[in-house]
Image: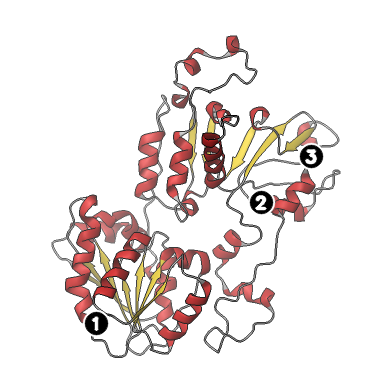
Amino acid sequence: MVNRLCRLHAQRTENGIDLMTLQRLQKVGLVVINLNPKAFGAPKVNVEHMDRFSDEFGTEEVSDNDDKNELSNNAPIKNLKSQNTSKPSDFQSLFGGNNNDRFVIGIKFTRRSIKLYSDFYSSDIIVASPMGIVTKIGQAEYDKEKDVDYLSSIEVLIIDHADVISMQNWSYLNSVVEELNHIPSKQHGTDVMRIRQWYLDGHARLYRQTILLSSYLNPDMNSLFNRHCLNYQGKVKLITEYKGVLPKVLLQVRQIYQRFDSISLTDADDDRLDYFAKKVFPKIKDFVQGGTMIFISSYFEFVRIRNFLKSQNSSFCLLGEYTKQSDISRARVWFFEGMRKIMLYTERAHFYHRYKIRGIKNLIMYSLPERKEFYPEIINMLEGSEEMSCTVLFSRLDQLRLERIVGTKHAKRMTSSDKSIFVFC
């Protein structure tokens, strides 16, 4: 089970698989296959159902009209193709082409062919998104004729782009992993005499190899690693020492980090909101010029801040991952023209759209972003403001996020120091 399909390395072959087809395959995941026919010891390799695959996962033109002319009476935009370059390269790589996140595909290998869309019970590899598998699990719960017993014999689990999955619904991935390596509900024509005893004893999960790939580590990944990676021969975690991304901030912005006290994870959200309400909000509520953007990592934090601002009768607008496009356009115009003093902006909204917000004079990072590259991107939006300032809230529990942004050495000092305020310029 992986979130994306395959990276294929090959030359044009006799069966008509060209570079364009390979790029389409590459857009949807991670199985490394060499399609050079010599590698199979045969003159030709046949890939079945390639036309269907191309129809379902072929590349499509992606318009990028989020940032152009939206503040000029929503004028129509031309040359959408050339506008794709306005987005960062990682955005184009991740979202270019078909980005369908609900798929399940079986792949079967024979001596001279690769069969796509093979039956799951006879497949050698199942390539799927968490949402795709969860959909199959849901169907099996309501239809007794369906089941997901093919998940019982998974020997190698590769969770690719776990950082991207964390920007979706991580609970889907947990549900999938919890469903692996159970005793099947039906026999499915299996010769019971050939089944190994440790499978019958329910120990299959202890023999499964799990590979978790991500550009960063967060508590959800740590939890999955500790609870579901249980191979009897042990496990390994690679830890990175970060240098930070502060040098990528191109503007002379005074970045003030304010640490609040929080001891337990259960109280962390309450402590953060309490600190914001008492220490930060009084300084911005009477800010006549407006232009204050509050960057929020979690949607749950977004809801809490929204409700708090409503209770204070504040002038604010919203830009979250569930905000309608028409409301987003209106909010950006209101904020730029000063009709709304405060804007709430979530990390997931930035992840999926990479908006460039205009009119920011004062930036407050209510919570640090998971993806370190977002930090300089957001701060660099202050360009053009006369009095630029940035306030960042963090606690000792934000160690993982903090070290990706300020660097491992600085993060250790900031979380252990008796001081609670730190300044970077």
Q: Amino acid at mark 3?
A: Glu
Question: Which x, y percent locates residue 356?
Answer: 48, 77
Q: Earlier in the sequence, mark 2 or mark 1?
A: 2
Local secondary structure at mark 1: loop
Which residue is outermost to the top?
Answer: 193
Instruction: Give the labeled residue for mark 1.
Output: 285
Real-space Cα distance between discs 3 and 1?
63 Å
Q: CA distance from mark 2 to mark 3?
A: 17 Å
Residue 270 is at least partly visible in this image: yes
| Residue count near mark 2 (Cα–Cα under 10 Å), binned few <14, some 14–19, many ≥20 | some
For the N terminus, the image quarter is top right
- Number of other residues with Cα within 10 Å of mark 1, as a class: few under 14, some 14 to 19, many 20 or more: some
Image position, residue 7 (x, y; %)? 65, 48
Under circle 2, the secondary element is helix
Q: Earlier in the sequence, mark 3 or mark 1?
A: 3
> What amino acid is found at the position of numbered circle 1 in the picture?
Lys
- Numbered tag placed on residue 419 in the rendering: none
Q: In this rendering, which labeled residue sits more in front, label 3 or label 1? A: 1
Which residue is denoted by mark 2 in the rendering?
26
Q: Residue at x 76, y 47 (%)?
A: 52
Between the C-alphas of marks 2 and 1, the distance is 49 Å
